[in-house]
Amino acid sequence: MTTNAPPAAALKVLPPQASADALPAAPRDLAPLLLVPALILLMLPLVGSFPTWVTLTIAGLAMGMMIFIMASGLTLVFGLMDVLNFGHGAFVAVGAYAATMVLIPMRGWLEVDSLLVNLGVLGLAIALAMLSTALLGWAFERIIIAPVYGQHLKQILITMGGMIVAEQLINVVWGAEQIALPLPASLRGAILIGDAAVEKYRLVAVVIGLLVFAGMFLVLNRTKIGLLIRAGVENREMVEAMGYRIRRLFVAVFAAGSALAGLGGVLWGLYKETLSAAMGGDIMVMIFIVIIIGGLGSVGGCFIGALLMALVANYAGFLAPKFALVSNIVLMIAILLWRPAGMYSKSR
Amino acid sequence: MSDPILQLSGVHTHIGEYHILQGVDLIVPRGGLSVLLGRNGAGKTTTLRTIMGLWKASAGTVRFDGREIAALPTPDIAQGGIAYVPESMAVFSDLTVRENLYLAARSGALDQQRVEWIFGFFPALKKFWHYPAGNLSGGQKQMVAIARAIVEPRKLLLIDEPTKGLAPAIIQSLIAAFRELKETQTTILLVEQNFNFVKNLGDTVSVMDDGRIVHAGSMRELVEDEALQQRLLGLSLASHQ
C-alpha cells in the first residue's frame, strides 16, 4: 500500500541531496569552554612553582571529574523530568557502601601488587554499586518521585525525607560506624611527572571521568535515545506528541543518573578512604552548585562547572586557604552574574 | 458523509476552572484539507490539543480512523497516525534540522526520497540541514515543524496557525507545501485565522466560536456565499477580509 506517498511528479523536480557544507558550521558558544584552560594557565604564574602547579591542577581535575560523575545524573533528571531531587546524595552513599560488599571481602585481592587484579576487583565493585543504585533509583522514582511530578515544593520535601530514610537504612544495613576504604595497592602513592608528584588514584579518577563524559557525550549526540533525552529536556510535550513514551525514558534516565551517582560514590569513597552514611548529604551542596552554574539540564555545563569548582577550590586552598572556604560560593556568584541561568542553560 | 477520518461529538474540555470546549461536534472527512476557523480564544487550539490528548476531554467522544481515542495517552494517539504541528512550532532548538526530522521518523531512519521531496517545497531546510534549529528564522522554524510532521506518512496532520507572524514570501511557500501535501492521501486539519490563506486551499471549513462549532460546510460554499460570510463575519472573519 502506498498511502501518503509523495507524488511522482514532485520527486522528479527535486534538488540534489543536502550537503553538509551548504553553510559554514553553526556558531558555537565557546566562552565557557575556554574558562577551564584559561584558569589553569592563569594560575601558573600565581602558583609560581611548575611542579606544584601540575600537582594542584591534576588534583583539581580529579576532584572535578568525581563531582561531575555524581552531578551529571542529577542535572539530566532535572532537565528532562523537572524534578528537584534533594535525595540524589543517597545514591552516592549507597553506591559507596554497596561497593564495600565486594571491596571488603576481596581485601586480599586489593593487596596484590598487580594493577590488573586491583582494577578487576574495583571494576566488580563499581558494577555492583551501579547496579544497586540503578535499582534503588528505579524504586525511588516509582515510589517517591512519581506522586509529586510537577510539584517542586513537595519534591524537595519528599526527596529530602527519602535521603534521611536512606541514610538511616545504611546505618541499619552496614552499621553506624565509619568504614575504612583503603585504596588498592597499585593505586596508592604517587608517580613523578618531572618534579611534580601526582597521586596515581587521581589519574585513574581523571581517566574514569573523561570516559564517563565521552560516553555521555556520544550517547546524547550520536544515538536516538540521546537525541530524545535532549529533545525531552527542551520540550517533553512535543516528544510525546511525536509518539514517544517519555515516561519510560524518564525512568530509564533516573535509573542511569542514580547509577552514575553510585559510581561517583565509589570513587569519592576511595578518594576520602572512609565512608559514612552522611557522605551523600555532605556533597549535595557541591553537586547543586555545579549543576546551577553549569546550567540546569546541561551535561556539558555540568562538566565545565565541576572542573571549575574543583580547580578553584584547589588553587585557593594553596594560594589563600581562608578564601578556599568560600571559593565555591564566590565562583557561583561570579558565574551567575555573567550568565544568570548558568553557562549552558536551556533558556540561552 | 461516510467514513470521516476524525469525528468529535459533544466534546467538552476544561482547563483548570475554565470551560473551554463546550460541546464541540466536528467532522473531518478522509482526504483533503479541512479548515477550522475562528477568532482568538474560540477554542481552536484547545480542540487540536484535545484531539492529541495533551488536554483530556472531560466529556464527549473523539473517534479517529474508527477508533475512540479520547482516553488514550498522547504517544498512542500519535502512533495511531496523527502528526501535530503546534502554534509554537516547538522545534527542538538545540538539535539540528536533520536531528529534528530524524526524531520525527519513528521507523528509525530518514527516507531520503521523502526528505528530497520535502526539500522541493522547503529548500531552506536543505541549506540549513546541519544547523541548530534554534538559529533559524520564524518561517524556517515553521518549515521544520511541518517537515517533521510529514517526514513519514501520517493519516492526519493537525496544524495550528502556521502563518502566524510570518512574512508573505514564507506564507507563499507554505501554500505551495500544502498544495503538495493535498496531492498525497494525508488528511489535513488546518487551524487558521487568516481566511485569505485558506480560502483557496480548504475543501471543507468549520467555524468555531465560544467553544462550539457554529458553522460547517464546504469552503467553496463559504467563499461564494457572501451572505454566509456576512453572517460569520461578526464572529470570526471580520478582521481577515
Image (spheres, coloured by chain):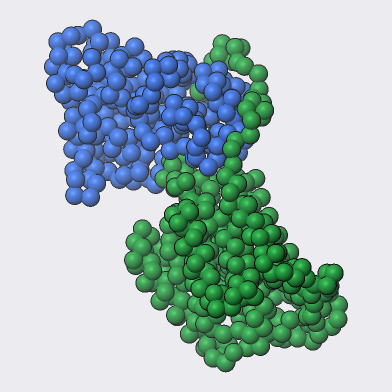
Chain colours: A green, B blue
- Compared to residue B193, the image places residue A217 above or below, namely below
Relative depth, front residue between B211 and A126? A126
- Compared to residue A81, the image places residue B37 above or below, namely above
Residue A134 visible, this angle: no
Left of B46 or right of it: where is A312?
Answer: right
Q: Going 77% across and 68% down the picture, which residue do you hit?
A: A50
Relative depth, front residue between A324 and B137? A324
Q: Quadrant of the N terminus of chain B?
A: top left
Q: Going 64% across and 81% down the picture, which residue do you hit?
A: A272
Where residue A319 appears, as percent x and y from the top left, is 63, 73
- Compared to residue A112, the image places residue B173 above or below, namely above
Where residue B145 appears, as percent x and y from the top left, is 46, 31
- Compared to residue B71, the image places residue B30 above or below, namely above
Where residue A275 appears, as percent x and y from the top left, is 60, 84
Q: Going 24% across and 18% down the picture, which residue do you hit?
A: B240
Q: Going 60% across and 35% down the picture, which residue do you hit?
A: A26
Left of B20 or right of it: where is B107?
Answer: right
